[in-house]
Image (cartoon, grey):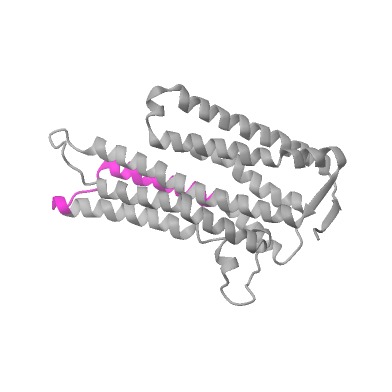
Amino acid sequence: MEHETWISLLWTKPIASSFICLILFTALTNIYVVWSIYKKRNLRNSSTAIIVANLACVDILVTLKDLPTFFSVAVSGHWVFEESWCASYGLTNVIFIVVSVSTLVTITTDKFSRLREMAIPQEHPSSHTHHPLILGYVIAHTTLSYSLSLLWSKYVFVTRKSFCRVEWPPRNGLSATFLSSFVFIVPVSFLIYNLLYTTVLKVNDCEKVKIEANPYEQKAQHQLHIAVSIFLLSWTPYVLESIISSHSQISPLTACRMSLFLYEFRPLVIF
């Protein structure tokens, strides 16, 4: 039987009202992103732009999912916290992790390949040194976007505590519940960085010229560092909230602030 608990919190109505404003602002921002992409003909031919537009549409739908709940809280002043909501919210966060990582990979790869093309001299138009890199990222993006999203979504439905509360330290050692909160963050980020950096070194070795890295390649690496740093920074508060909640009780409104921070931050990453 589903268990429901009514929680009365101070300043609930003004906080919920501010969340409603943030949700509407996020939806309008994402609508502007979609409109900007489809307005320009050259962007409509870019696979990266189409992926960003699809991400913005998903962001709108998932963000608006919580709008009725916040409206109810703003009117009644009470928060209904139930286990089914916890499982649903865990699923939402897992999907957002996968989509964020795959989109980050796609955008940085597209920028890197374009900068590489600009760096190739005009007298050597047949150079294809970056094609293996693009192929590898296409495979990685497809894998992260579809297969893992289905796998981890099913896992969260079975173990709803994976994102509502994380046991720290785990009772049974390094449990799968604990790993599910971090497996998509640090390893993937280091993988992207190391793969791009190794590719730059291989290109320099093939040319057999010991010179400093091409300025376009340096710019691509700097953009990658910024993108990965923003991604890790945006997810850090939610991870900290999960760790703290294993030791003490955190109100639902506090937990929602972490997730809403991610929602508000994502359009900035896109731009």
The percent coordinates of residue 237 (x first, y second) are: 62, 53
Is residue 189 in the magenta section? no
Can residue 271 be seen by looking at this rendering? Answer: no
**The residue positioned farthest toward the front in the image shown:** 1
The percent coordinates of residue 238 (x first, y second) are: 62, 54
Magenta span dominant secondary structure: helix
Query: What residue is rendered at 41% in x and 41% in y?
Result: 107
The percent coordinates of residue 21 (x first, y second) are: 71, 33
Report whether 179 appears left or right of 10.
Answer: left
Measured along the vertical axis of the image, is residue 25 above or below residue 232? Answer: above
Number of marks in the rendered image: 0
The percent coordinates of residue 69 (x first, y second) are: 76, 42
Report whether 240 appears left or right of 100.
Answer: right
Quarter of the figure with the N terminus: bottom right
Is residue 209 in the magenta section? yes
Measured along the vertical axis of the image, is residue 139 above or below residue 112? Answer: below
Can residue 241 be seen by looking at this rendering? Answer: yes
Find the magenta span and give its range: 206-233
Measured along the vertical axis of the image, is residue 61 above or below residue 253? Answer: above
